[in-house]
Each structure stands twice: as C-alpha cells, then as structure tokens.
Image: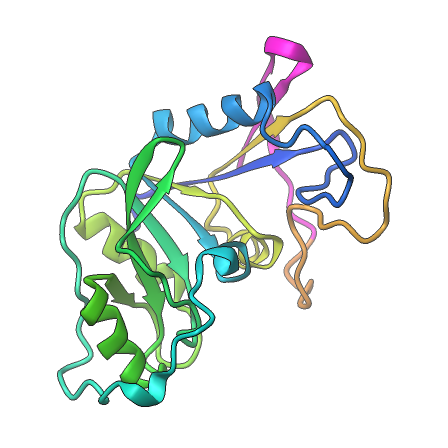
C-alpha cells in the first residue's frame, strides 16, 4: 500500500538542541511551549511519542498476574475519535489509567502501538480500560505498516513528537517528510540532556533536509521548518 500519510517530526528544543532539562525553574511551559502545543493540534488530529516519554502517565502498581490472557485474535482494537495519541509501546509496558490523554486542554484518544509479542494479559488490561491498540509488527515495530494503518483511519498528517530513539527510527527509514523545530530562547549547557534524534544504530545516517521556512515568533521563540 502506498503511504499517503505525511510525517512531521515536531519537537520543542532549547537553543543548544536539547529536549529535556534538569535546570530548576526552567521555563518549560512558557510562551514557547504554548506555541509548540498550538502547532501540534493545529496541524493534525494525530500525534505520538515513544514509551519513555509517556512513562509518567503509566500506573506502576498494575499486577499483570491478576489478568487472564486474552485468547482472541491478534486484531487491532480501535474506536474512531476526534484526536488520537499514539503510544509506541513495543513490548506492552505502559499501563494508562484512562483511555484519553488529557493534554493541552485536549482529550486525545490513546492508541497503543504494540507488537504481536506482547503478553496476552496486557491485551486484557487494555480492553478492561477501553484503551485502543494497534499491532504493528511481530517482534519489532514495523513503521511502514503503522503508517499504512493510519491511512486506513483517514489520517492525513502524523505529528511525531519524540523521543530521540523513536525519531531516529522514523528518520533512518526515510519516513519523515518534514521537521518542525520550535526553539525557546534558553540554553541548558549540559552534556547529558537528550538531543531530538539519538539512536544506537547510525548506519543509515547522515540524512539531509532542506530549509522550508523560518519564523520569529512571540517572546523570542523561533520555529524552523525543514523538508525532505
């Protein structure tokens, strides 16, 4: 199936290219953050992040041994909604308490992107919470299959919002059409903070993009747009 879904890697960075900070009282949710979130939801009704990004929403007290294995077919369970939040959870380690991600005053319907290797009890957990899920690969993520399934859902544009490992996987496979960077006027300065692309396998890099647009926005925020 020809992929008709545009993928935009959309990230919120500091001047030194970091997406994370441990600096006390850092203005992470000031004007620049508002601008970033506004672009996210104005551009598409589908966005997503990797497992580590969503760890803070996961219930650490779930005991899978209390759930019976799901014995049904390994088929997607998706209920149509207005906004979708995709969580790339290959092995099934995220236990969301609710079927919606309440973020930026928007209720985005969670869809867990999993592989066929997940524990069948994890499927039972998801179904008990009404959390949607989508199979995309047997043991590892098949990102082309994921995008094909987005197309079938009628999604035209997907906002890929990190983290660095997931971004690296999409970019390595040439699946990112555009890169959108919202840069706040701050510098972290450390060596340990994460950049927006970073994976173990760099055999498919470097990748080159062309500048599409640059905008200077409110409170010294800059948005840089690249295209493939």
Q: Is residue 90 left or right of residue 222?
A: left
Q: Is residue 145 above or below residue 178?
A: below
Residue at 32% from the left image edge and 54% from the top image edge: 147
Residue at 76% from the left image edge and 29% from the top image edge: 15
Tell me residue 203's x, y (percent).
Answer: 68, 65
Query: In this figure, what is the number of numbered marks?
Result: 0
Tell me residue 47's x, y (percent).
Answer: 38, 43
Q: Is residue 13 above or below residue 133?
A: above
Q: Which residue is most to the front?
A: 61
- The magenta stretch spans residue 146: no
Q: Is residue 227 above or below residue 120?
A: above
Tell me residue 217's x, y (percent).
Answer: 59, 11
Q: Is residue 70 visible?
A: yes
Q: Is residue 205 above or below residue 203?
A: above
Would you identify the image quadrant in which residue 179 lies? top right
Q: Is residue 73 left or right of residue 145?
A: left
Q: Is residue 224 visible?
A: no
Would you identify the image quadrant in which residue 137 lies? bottom left
Tell me residue 205's x, y (percent).
Answer: 67, 55
Name the foreground residue: 87 vs 61. 61
Q: Quadrant of the N terminus?
A: bottom left
Q: Which residues are magenta?
A: 206-228
Q: How is the image coloured?
A: rainbow
Q: Is residue 185 left or right of residue 52?
A: right
Residue at 51% from the left image edge and 60% from the top image edge: 55
Residue at 39% from the left image edge and 74% from the top image edge: 92
């Amino acid at each position: 199936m020809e992929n008709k879904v545009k993928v935009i890697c959309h990230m919120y960075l500091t001047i030194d290219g970091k997406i994370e900070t441990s600096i006390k009282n850092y203005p992470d949710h000031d004007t620049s953050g508002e601008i970033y979130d506004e672009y996210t939801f104005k551009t598409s009704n589908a966005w997503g992040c990797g497992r580590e990004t969503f760890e803070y929403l996961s219930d650490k007290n779930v005991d899978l041994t209390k759930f019976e294995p799901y014995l049904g077919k390994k088929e997607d369970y998706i209920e149509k909604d207005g906004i979708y939040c995709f969580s790339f959870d290959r092995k099934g380690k995220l236990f969301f308490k609710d079927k919606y991600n309440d973020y930026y005053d928007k209720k985005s319907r969670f869809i867990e992107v999993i592989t066929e290797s997940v524990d069948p009890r994890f499927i039972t957990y998801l179904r008990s919470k009404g959390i949607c899920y989508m199979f995309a690969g047997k043991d590892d993520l098949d990102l082309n299959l994921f995008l094909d399934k987005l197309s079938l859902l009628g999604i035209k544009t997907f906002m890929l919002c990190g983290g660095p490992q997931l971004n690296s996987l999409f970019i390595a496979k040439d699946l990112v059409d555009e890169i959108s960077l919202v840069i706040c006027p701050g510098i972290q300065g450390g060596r340990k903070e994460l950049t927006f692309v970073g994976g173990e396998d760099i055999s498919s890099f470097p990748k080159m993009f062309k500048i599409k647009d640059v905008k200077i926005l409110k409170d010294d925020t800059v948005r840089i747009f690249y295209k493939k």
